[in-house]
Image (tube, grey):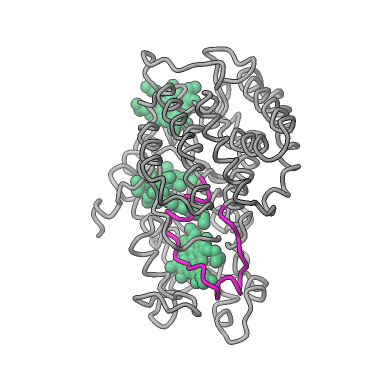
Amino acid sequence: MLDEHHFRPRRILAAHGPVRWAGALAVIAVLAHAASVTAQTGPSGPKHLGVASCASSVCHGKSTAQPPGHVPLNEYRTWFNDDRHAQAYHALESAQSRQIAAKLGLPNAMQDICLNCHSDNVPKPLQGAKFQIRDGVSCEVCHGASEKWIETHAQKGATHGANVAQGLYPSEQPTKRAELCLSCHLGTRDRFATHEIMGAGHPRLFFELGTFTVDQPAHFKVTDYYLSRKGKIDTMNLWVTGQIEDAERYLTLVQSPLFTAGGIVPELTFYDCNACHHPKEKMRWSAAHAGAGVKPGTLRLQKQAFVMLQAMLDALATPDAAAQLNGATDALVRAGGSDVPSVRAASQRVLDQLHGLDGWTKRVYSSSDIGKVRKTLLRYAAEDKASDYSTAEQVVLGVQTLSYALNDSAGHQDTFKALFASLGTGADFNAAQFAETAKHAGTQF
Ligand code: HEC
Ligand code: HEC
Ligand code: HEC
Ligand code: HEC
């Protein structure tokens, strides 16, 4: 039995201290993502053989990383010892989960609505002999069912392309990786942490691809050998891709029946949590961050990913392109306070604009480009355009990720600390103080 100490309270890790940007990541994958998808369409497809099939000491369970020129092969150790995904099933046995389940009227949390994100919840016929649901978010959740490739993937002459053709998930590709992570860290139509689940005590979800890749922590090493097999992916491309995928998925979910499942009250998780969840004595509304034509006291849809992409366009495209996205975002937020058809139409207009940005995921960014985006994020924050908590949080995570991309993060640790500190916990977030801190931070870069 694992006791509660194993569930290290690292939540919002990122939001409460600079991330360990370990050496791993100059680089950087929804499968028949099997969990709910297969559950719905009926069990067919290759089997999930289970962690025990990957973890032997001659495979991915070595005690130390192999020297450069090899795959590290200690991935299982890193995952088991340091990765919260290994604890994700056990988290459903915790006191917090028992409370959540009780409030939802469930006998316990070992139910599909939880297991779909907290384990490799594939139907029985797809579970191999060594498969264990208790392994949590395990290797095959991210790397795909291994039945077809486990024997061949490490043979001499096996290429990454050939493995992918056998069903290995291409998690090195930023778009594929973002889709994979967001399938749980934001949700899909089939698995979603609704406001009912949040109201029962589930933590708020947030995501940023660069930060979360490092924080997992990464169990791969970007060596010449890695690059020769998988190619180079710059951190900036990870950040941009994460924002675009997050924005597109959010809009697709807003357009789905999830948005209206509650009747007269829309699904509240699509709205800015802290707009409702803060003491009314601490007033923070301003026209600058609410957006054009958004009146005080109205519900505001979340817009953090759109604001990040506006900043990118502002810095690297034309002010017109940024203004266009800004206009479409404000129209969406206004629609979010009116009626469902307006929300659907306004979200489609934003989606159409985002589709035009696909090329930005693969673009080559110069240091000067990345520096300009970082500066613009801090300028938006200083100008009070990033004062919804989730937007402020993305500014801070973004500044840190882009500093990593620029390889100058070591000299800015104090600035990151100040920015993280000014985020607080959400309920105590002080928008004016955040803007001040961001203004000062802007002078440091
Ligand atoms: C099947 C669902 C699922 C997928 C896919 C998934 N995660 Fe997670 N992730 C979780 C769950 C559940 C937790 C919380 C586990 C716990 O604390 O018990 C988590 C926790 C984390 C944490 C720790 C967060 C914190 O606050 O400490 C990081 C970092 C993370 N995931 C990164 C990633 C990345 C990067 C990807 C994609 C490569 C990814 N996750 C894919 C379900 C998933
Ligand atoms: C859409 C996917 C999703 C669903 C559905 C979901 N969770 Fe989670 N859960 C997550 C992710 C992702 C995290 C990690 C959040 C973070 O730290 O960023 C998490 C974190 C948690 C935590 C905190 C874990 C820790 O180590 O602090 C608990 C407890 C939890 N979930 C319980 C549940 C229960 C109980 C259910 C079912 C009622 C459930 N979850 C449904 C994705 C999900
Ligand atoms: C939450 C998602 C996630 C889980 C769970 C996960 N991985 Fe990974 N893994 C990744 C990502 C992302 C990468 C980096 C991109 C890539 O190379 O595909 C990666 C890379 C790897 C690599 C490539 C190393 C290289 O040099 O090419 C191996 C091997 C690997 N993982 C093995 C495992 C094993 C074994 C487990 C289970 C013990 C596991 N992974 C669990 C996401 C995950
Ligand atoms: C429109 C306002 C609104 C938004 C937006 C909103 N909530 Fe709530 N939330 C409520 C209300 C109303 C309750 C019920 C409070 C009660 O019963 O006392 C609640 C309850 C909760 C609770 C339980 C509080 C308690 O004391 O039991 C949590 C946790 C929570 N919400 C989290 C969130 C998160 C996370 C988000 C964003 C993803 C969010 N909420 C968005 C209005 C909102």
Q: Which residues are magenta?
A: 208-235
Residue at horizontal 49 percent and vertical 26 percent from the top: 387
Instruction: Quadrant for the N terminus, please.
Output: bottom left
Residue at horizontal 62 percent and vertical 67 percent from the top: 231
The x, y position of residue 394, in whole percent, is 50, 38
The x, y position of residue 326, in whole percent, is 67, 28
Q: Is residue 127 visible?
A: no
Q: Is residue 344 visible?
A: yes
**Dividing the picture into quarters, in which one does residue 57 lie?**
bottom left
Is residue 65 or residue 442 the one in the foreground? 442
Residue 193 falls inside the magenta stretch: no
Is residue 320 or residue 210 the one in the foreground? 320
**Dividing the picture into quarters, in which one does residue 433 lie?**
top left
Q: How many marks?
A: 0
Image side of residue 144 versus residue 89, left or right: right
The x, y position of residue 263, in whole percent, is 58, 24
Residue at horizontal 40 percent and vertical 63 percent from the top: 135
Is residue 405 or residue 442 the one in the foreground? 442
The x, y position of residue 172, in whole percent, is 58, 63
Residue at the far bottom in the pictured view:
156
Measured along the vertical axis of the image, is residue 73 above or below residue 261?
Answer: below
Residue 215 falls inside the magenta stretch: yes
Image side of residue 339 versus residue 62, left or right: right
Measured along the vertical axis of the image, is residue 254 above or below residue 235?
Answer: above
Measured along the vertical axis of the image, is residue 309 above or below residue 132?
Answer: above
Is residue 444 or residue 313 the one in the foreground? 444
Measured along the vertical axis of the image, is residue 12 above or below residue 379?
Answer: below
